[in-house]
Image (tube, rainbow, N blue to C red):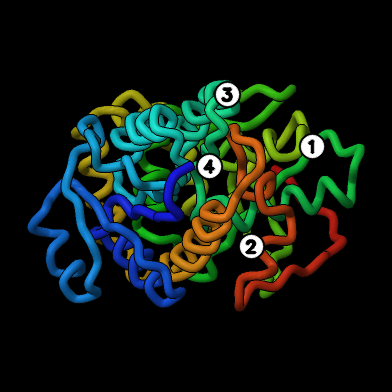
Amino acid sequence: MKNNQLMIYGAYGYAGELMVREAVAQRLRPIIAGRDAEKLKPIATELSLECRAFGVRNTGSNLQDISVLLNCAGPFSATAEPLARACLAQQIHYLDITGEIDIFRKCHALDEEARQQNVLILPGAGTDIVPTDCLAAMLKEKLPVATRIDLALSFGTNPSIGTVNTMIESFGKGGLIREGGMLKVVSNAFQMRKIPFQNKPQWAMTIPWGDVFTSGISTGVPDGAVYMAMPRMSIYMIRLTNPVKGILNTQFGQKITKRLAGWLMKSTPNVYALTATVGIRIAQYCLDYTGPGGYYTPSMLLGSRFIESIPGIEVHVLNQRLRKI
């Protein structure tokens, strides 16, 4: 590995700028990067940071002195794989904050090459999967013979518009669960459960969240699903999309559905601040990392208790039976 230098790519996006400011608050001096030099200049000037403008498929010499690259530039379907491959070629640890299953699968396919190059490949270094990945690993430790682990999410109010858009993009493809260690395509809102969340029980539906894939890698547990809390009527409405998945998978269908979601969303939680805290903590760990390379999930690299080290995070163990429909 090279100098102990962090690069944050996509630094002028909302999440990227939060990452940069958190890094500076933690006394790091990251090199900030992205595709647009003009958009980089204001934050680089304000924080007295070096900036570099380049495309994900034309990294050139821009990575030659970097030891860890944190990718915050979406869409990750366009940026993750080329940047991860560029990092492999130059022996640089790769991180991103995606929550998309397709990206996790593509990065996991790089595991053997990453081992040979002694490079870390860790997509999902944000709040999309870090809390739930650590929770899945805790459950596996408490239930070592478990053959199924289900996870559930509640945002308290509404999920963020970014999360909703990711869900909309999946509606045209259907849902996903893990069965026998393999991903299985199912209908949208395939199952409903009333989940005993800490504040109050809430109805939730299965969604094709990143943990459907990553928690299987982290724990080795063959079966599982991820649920998201939603109003019961909304779940029934989502189930109505199953006969028209073909339309929802078109550009027109996506555009109309996302516009409707944006109009309906009145408040969103500030999950991005937590993503910045978590992402920079993981980046700091990787800067000092001297262990073996390969594909890692957050809990595989930092342990199941990592999430408890983040200020404001609490873990509660409940013992209640769940109702499934």
Is there any visible trace of residue 142 in the rendered image?
yes
Sequence order check: which comes first, mark 4 or mark 2? Answer: 4
Q: Local crowd at mark 1 within 10 Å, few (<14), some, or many (≥20)?
A: some
Q: CA distance from mark 1 to mark 2?
A: 21 Å
Q: Which residue is mark 2?
A: 202
Is there any visible trace of residue 242 in the rendered image?
no
Sequence order check: which comes first, mark 1 or mark 4? Answer: 4
Residue plotted at (67% across, 75% down): 199
| In this picture, residue 71 sits left or right of residue 282 | left
- Residue 4 on image: x %, y %: 45, 55
Residue plotted at (62% across, 58% down): 131
Q: CA distance from mark 3 to mark 1?
A: 32 Å
Q: CA distance from mark 3 to mark 4?
A: 16 Å
- In the rendered structure, find residue 116 and report the number of the disc placed on it: 3
Q: CA distance from mark 4 to mark 2?
A: 32 Å
Q: Which residue is mark 1?
A: 148
Q: Which residue is mark 4?
A: 122
